[in-house]
Structures are given as structure tokens and as C-alpha cells.
Amino acid sequence: MDLENIDTEKWIELGLQYGLKIIGAIVIWIIGSWVIRNLMKGTKAVMSKRDYDESLQKFLLNLLSWILKIVLIVVVLGTMGVETTSFAAILAAAGLAIGMALQGSLGNFAGGVLIMIFKPIKIGDLIEAQGEIGVVKEIEIFTTKLIGLSNKEIIIPNGSLSNGNIINYTTEGTRRVDLTIGVSYDADIKKTKDVLMRVLLANPKVLKTPEPTVNVLELADSSVNFAVRPWCNSADYWNVYFETTENVKEALDAAGIEIPYPHQVEIHKQG
């Protein structure tokens, strides 16, 4: 018996058996990846054509991509001879273990789903949540990204975001600027109100409807405080805030109306 020939035949047989499976798996992977890419492009085109919300598009496409890739991996493993039933059982057990270890991440995933369903925010909205203020840049599966007012990126877990309070400054389209201006007790109230109102009406970014208001807010310890309340488009909020603050100071100075501030009194001792 020629042992060398037997070993050679065995290796050839094994090579043919597993080589064909490996080649088949590679072919399936290449074709499957191509199919997934084109399916994702087609799905994105359909969503865009039907005017799906941009946030919802990115979330669903991201989720669909992961699902299809997992299915492709299972098919490739099955082609290579791996028992998919056993693999599914292992995957389920691993998923349970990972799920228990990553309860926070699953909560973030659920939070992302809730945000997509109820849509309290969308990309481009200016919001305040979890102690942060910024414009929504992207809503992902587990997190939401904001661009802060100083152009910093803020990442908030979706679980915390969906379970906490969200202030959306963009939804209504307009915002009220709340300013408190204090003047001296010697100032004439009617004259002060007229000066403050003229400042608001002179700013083209201040809306005529709703009308801006100026009212006495309180009689403080060292000043009479006025509530100055102009309305503006959400995009103009900070411009109106800063412009009004500056223009009010200039207008009060021009009108001879004093804005109280702490004075230091020097006491000279007699030697």
C-alpha cells in the first residue's frame, strides 16, 4: 500500500471539499455585499422621494444595514458548513449575555426608536436637553449628536434624551427674548418705557406680531427693573439679544437715564 499516494489523495479530497466551500462563501460575500449596497441606495432613494424625515432616514438605513449584514454573515457561515441552527443558538445565548451586560445600550436603542416614532426633535432643531444646548446634527441608533453654540460636538445617549425634558426652540418658529433692564429710582417710568420701546421697534429683526412689550417687572433694592420682551424668528434670537442689550445701553445714556451700578466711596482718615 502506497501511504504517500493515500495522503495525497486525502489532501486533494479535503482541498476540493473545503476549497469549493470557501470559494462559494467568498462569492456569496461579494455578491451579498453588492446586493446590500444597491438595496441601501434604492431604499434611500425611495425614502428621499417620499420626503421621509432626514433623521428617520439615517436611523432606519443604519438599522437595516446592520440587519442585512448579520443575515449575510449567517448565510456565508452556512455555506462553509457551519451549522446555522447551532450558530443561531450560540448567537441567541451571546445576545442574551451581551444584552444583560449592555442594558444601558439597549435602553439607548429603545430611546432612539421612541425619538423616531414620536419625533420630539429632528435634524436642524435648536434644543436644550440634559443641561446642554445645541443644534441637532444627527440622530443615531444609540446617541444623538448636537453642535453646541460654541461649535463643539455634544453626544447625548438616546435613553437619557428620551426620558428627560427636551426644550425645542425651533418647533414654533419664533422665540421671545427675555431681558431685564434696571434703571435708577430717579428715572421717569413713562419716559424709560418709551425709550426702551423705541429701541425694540427700531430693530428690523424684532417682529411686529406678537408685539414687543415693556413693563415694570419689580421694584428692586437699588433699581426699578423693566421686563423687555421682544419677539423674533428663532434664527435671529442671539442677534436680537445682543443688539437689544447694546442699543438699550446707548439709548438710556443718550436720554440721561441712569443704569444703577455699585459705587465705591473712598473714606479719607484725618491724620
Image (cartoon, rainbow, N blue to C red):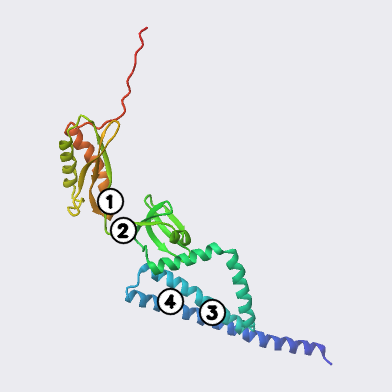
Circle nearer the N terminus (1, 3): 3
**Distance between mark 2 and mark 1 Cα atoms:** 11 Å
| Amino acid at the residue labelled 4 | Met
Q: Are marks 3 and 2 in contact (CB under 8 Å)?
A: no
**Res 270 visible:** yes
In the rendered image, which residue does mark 1 sit on?
237
Report which quarter residue 114 is drawn in: bottom left
Give the residue at x 25% y 48%: 240
| Amino acid at the residue labelled 3 | Val
Give the residue at x 24% y 52%: 232
Q: Is residue 211 left or right of residue 40?
A: left
Circle 2: is it few (<14), some (14-19), or many (20+) Cα within 10 Å?
A: some
Please tell me which residue lies in front, 28 or 252: 252
Circle nearer the N terminus (2, 1): 2
Q: In this rendering, is residue 173 above or below 38?
A: above
**Distance between mark 1 and mark 3 Cα atoms:** 49 Å
Circle number at residue 40: 4
Q: Are marks 1 and 3 in contact (CB under 8 Å)?
A: no
**Distance between mark 2 and mark 4 Cα atoms:** 31 Å
**Distance between mark 3 and mark 4 Cα atoms:** 15 Å
In the rendered image, which residue does mark 3 sit on?
71
| Amino acid at the residue labelled 2 | Thr
In the rendered image, which residue does mark 2 sit on?
170
Please tell me which residue lies in front, 246 or 93: 93
**Res 22 visible:** no
